[in-house]
Amino acid sequence: MTIDPIPSHALATLSVEHDQLRAMIARCEELSDDHDGHGEGSVEAAQLLRAVAALRQAFDHHNRLEERVLPPLLLDADWSGAVRVSRMVEDHVEEHAALSRELDMTTLGELRRVLASLRAHLDSEERYFLTRRVLRDDLA
C-alpha cells in the first residue's frame, strides 16, 4: 500500500489501521473468553488460532507500512533531530518485532497478556507518533 507523503494523510491511514487492529484484538479476546468457557458460545481452538494469525498478519503489514512512512515524516518534522529520530525508529522496529513474535504464544494466559501489550503499544504510538502535533502538514 502506498501512503500519500502528506503527514495528515499518513496519520489518517495509520489511524484507520489502528482501529482495525483494535477490532481484531477485541475479537481475539472474545474468542479467548469463549474458548476458555467465560463466554456464551463454544469456540474451537482452530477458530481462535485463525483469528490470532489474521491479527499477526495485519499487525505485520501495518508495521511494514508504518516503518516505511514514519521515519521521513518524523525527520521532516525535525522536532527531535536526526540522531534521536533514528534511535526512536530503531527501538520502535524492535518493539514491533518482539510483539509479532509474542503473538505466536500458545496459552490463553499468554495470549491475553500479549493482546494487552499490543493494545498498549497502539496507544503509545498514538500518544507520541501518530498525533497532529507531530504529523503536521505545515512542516512537510
Image (tube, rainbow, N blue to C red):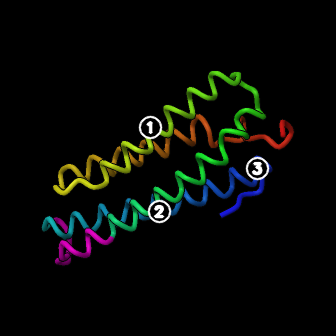
Identify the amino acid type marked 1: Glu
- Above or below, 26 against 140 in this view is below
34 falls in the magenta region: no
Q: Residue at x 83, y 43 (%)?
A: 137
Give the mark nearer the N terminus: 3 vs 1: 3
Assess disc 2: are there few (<14), some (14-19) or many (≥20) residues with their C-alpha within 10 Å of its C-alpha. some
From which residue to which does the magenta span run? 38-50
The residue identified by callout 3 is: 8
Report the front residue among 37 and 95. Answer: 95
Report the front residue among 82 and 127. Answer: 82
Identify the amino acid type marked 2: Ala
The quadrant where residue 94 appears: top left
Mark 1–mark 2 CB contact (< 8 Å): no
Please identify, in this view, whether the residue under mark 3 or under mark 1 is nearer the observer: 1
Q: Residue at x 65, y 43 (%)?
A: 70
Secondary structure category for the residue under label 1: helix
Q: Residue at x 71, y 22 (%)?
A: 81
The residue identified by callout 2 is: 58
- Location of the C terminus by quadrant is top right
Residue 94 — which label? 1
| Distance from the alpha carbon under mark 1 to that under mark 2 | 17 Å
| Distance from the alpha carbon under mark 2 to that under mark 3 | 22 Å
- Above or below, 96 against 65 in this view is above
Q: Is residue 42 left or right of residue 3?
A: left
Counting from the top left corner in percent of width and height, residue 64 is at 55, 53
Secondary structure category for the residue under label 2: helix
